[in-house]
Structures are given as structure tokens and as C-alpha cells.
Image: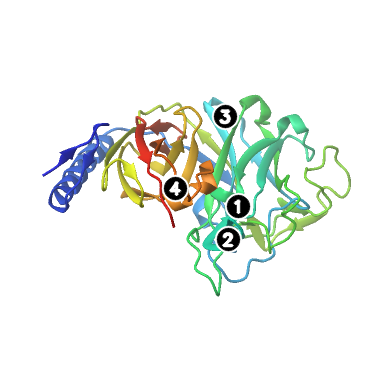
Amino acid sequence: MQKQLKNGLTRISRKWFKILLLATYYLLLTTYCLYSQTTISYPLYLCEAGNPNDYRLFANGGGWDGFWYVGYNRVWIEKIFIPGNLSEYKKVFIGAKLGRMKSKQVYNNGKATLDKEAIPGDIFIAVSSTPSWKKSNWKFLTTTDNISFEGDNELAVEQVGESRWFWTEVRSDEINFGGENYIALWSTSAFLTDSSNSPIIAAAWGGKDANSFINDEIKGGPPQHFSTTTLKSPLTVFEPAIAIKFVPELSQNITVGLMGITEGENLAEKKVIYASVLGNEIQKVWLEISQDNKIWKKHGLISYTSPYIFSLNPKKLSLDIGYGNKKRAASALFIRVCATDIWENTGRSPSVKIFISGIDK
């Protein structure tokens, strides 16, 4: 049978866990059928390849990366014409598809562990009607730890995976409707200077027209004034995965719930957290943790497909909240699960308090 916990979650036995999964599947299927009967306006994507799913080169897993890194000393530039009638869309996002982030060994008390973490860095993006970008137009896109890692021929690496799109919103008045727009992508982090320490931007096969460019003469920022060298290196064989997403007015309520935690509330060993997400076109789901129920931080890997099941390992909490491995009194930790859809709506589960018990490796 099920045992009720203080916070309302359920300790799941194997028998009832199977029943719970079947019930959840039925509920999700019913919800999908209801949504499928409704007319939905989808986002519009503008990119050189025509299809954002066609950018499958360089940034997935391993193999030749084309030296297509995003770094401190390199800016990628994409020229995109935007028709005037697209100004009717309610929101505009610019983004890039990134993968193969480089990682480094994690040390605990001076000793190497089996874990690896991303080489720290920030990726920025900006849009302008001319090939020059004021600092006031810079938009933060992502940190490097959100990007899938590159594999290692000798070591096991957890975060290896497919390249993914990252998006950030821009104001409509920053877009040149009915004219050319130039999108710049780069890093402000001096550690990211070549393929051996930087993420890789995905690519698609190109054509004869040169609407994409590389500039290797920057230092942490794109050109703020146009010169003859700004667009000096045009690309034709391959196209970088840089795009604009136009989102219609569609606000759906994404319902996120915590279904249960195996082995209950006390966190002395790894716990498995089960979540349900109800909504149309869910894009990604992730676990967040907090020490005060106010400031939240993503923990673990992002899930892009169901089932939405996450692991919380106390031995890895030191990377996120500074929790040590020595014996200590139990302390509170809040958890929640978040989800976004393709319209960039976000839903969050109610937070739940669990307790970290003292552990000793």
C-alpha cells in the first residue's frame, strides 16, 4: 500500500507504482485528445535552412566539428529578411542550436571524482538592422552548463546528448520588419577560445547565397560599428543554426505536479522524483532546488521527452548549493519541477520540502 508523507507526497511501492504510471498515461492520453480537437496557432521560424530541424551537422555527439565553435574571439552573424506582416505576432525570440560543450574534471576536497562539469561560460546573442550591435541590445542566451557535453573516448560522461535550440525574447521594436536583420552570436567568456574548450554551433547544408558570416577579430563582443572586416568571411557550404521565432498569442496553463519520491522525504541516498506534466507541445522539463524556497537553481539534466523522472543525488549537491560530504545535522531542501512549451510558456509544480540527512562517504 501507499504511505502518506508529511508533505502530501507518496512513498511508492512497486505494485502501486505500476498502477500510478498506467493512470498517468491514461490522463496524458486523454489530455492530448482534448488538445488535438482544438485549432492551435504554432510559432513561425525563420532561418536560412528553412527548417530548424535541418541543422544536424557538427554539434551532435562526436566526429568532425568543422571548427565551428562559439567563443570569446569569434562572432557568428546571420542575415535574415523579415516580412513586414510578421509584426502582428505578439512575441519574438532569437536563438541558436548548440551542442558538444567541453567539460572538465570535478574535484572534491582536492580529490578527483568521476563527475565532470562544463567549462564555465556565457553565450550571448543580439539582433540589429545593421551589422553593428550596441551593448544595450545584447541578450543573454544560456550558460555553458545547459549545453549537451561532447563525448570522451576514454571517460564516461553523463551529459552527452543531442544539440538543442536555446531562445531569448527580444522586443518587437528591436526587429526591422520589412527589411534585413543581422543576428550575432558569441561568448563573453575568455576561457572559450577554440573547439577544445567551447560549444559547437549546429550546421545545415548551405546554398550559393552568402547570408551567414564569421568574424574572428572580436574580444568578448560583436562589432559596435560597421567596418569592411565585419562581414569579411561569408559562408556558403554550411549554414549556422541561428534563427528567429515568432510566437502568436497563446497562453496555456502548463500543469506540473510531483507524483512521488522513492524512499520518502529524508535525503541520505539518491532519490528518484516522479513528475507529471500536462500541456500541449511541451519543449523541456527540469528539476530545480532551493535552500530558502525563493532562489532556485536547475539541478541535473533537462528532460526533453517523457517520462519525467529525475534523480537527486546528495553527493552531487555540493556543486549546486555547497553541501559537503561530512556528517552534519539534517537540513531542509526545497524541490520543484518546471516545464516550458514551444510558445515559451512556463509551468512550475508546488515546491516540496525534503531533508538532507548527514552522510559520510
Q: Within 10 angstroms of label 3, few (less than 14), some, or many (20 or more) residues? A: few
Q: Within 10 angstroms of label 2, few (less than 14), some, or many (20 or more) residues? A: many
Q: Nearer the viewer, residue 15 or 209?
A: 15
Element assignment for label 1: loop
Name of the residue lying farthest toward the left: 1
> Which of pointers 1 and 3 lies earlier in the amino acid sequence?
3
Element assignment for label 3: helix
Is label 2 in contact with label 1 (beta carbons under 8 Å)? yes
> Which of pointers 2 and 4 lies earlier in the amino acid sequence?
2
> Which of pointers 2 and 3 lies earlier in the amino acid sequence?
2
Amino acid type at mark 2: Ala
Give the numbered dot on residue 85. 3
Give the numbered dot on residue 59. 2
Is label 2 in contact with label 3 (beta carbons under 8 Å)? no
Q: Nearer the viewer, residue 290 or 191?
A: 290
Is label 4 in contact with label 3 (beta carbons under 8 Å)? no
Q: Nearer the viewer, mark 2 or mark 1?
A: 2
Say which quadrant the C terminus sits in. bottom left
Look at the image and tell me whether residue 15 can be seen: yes
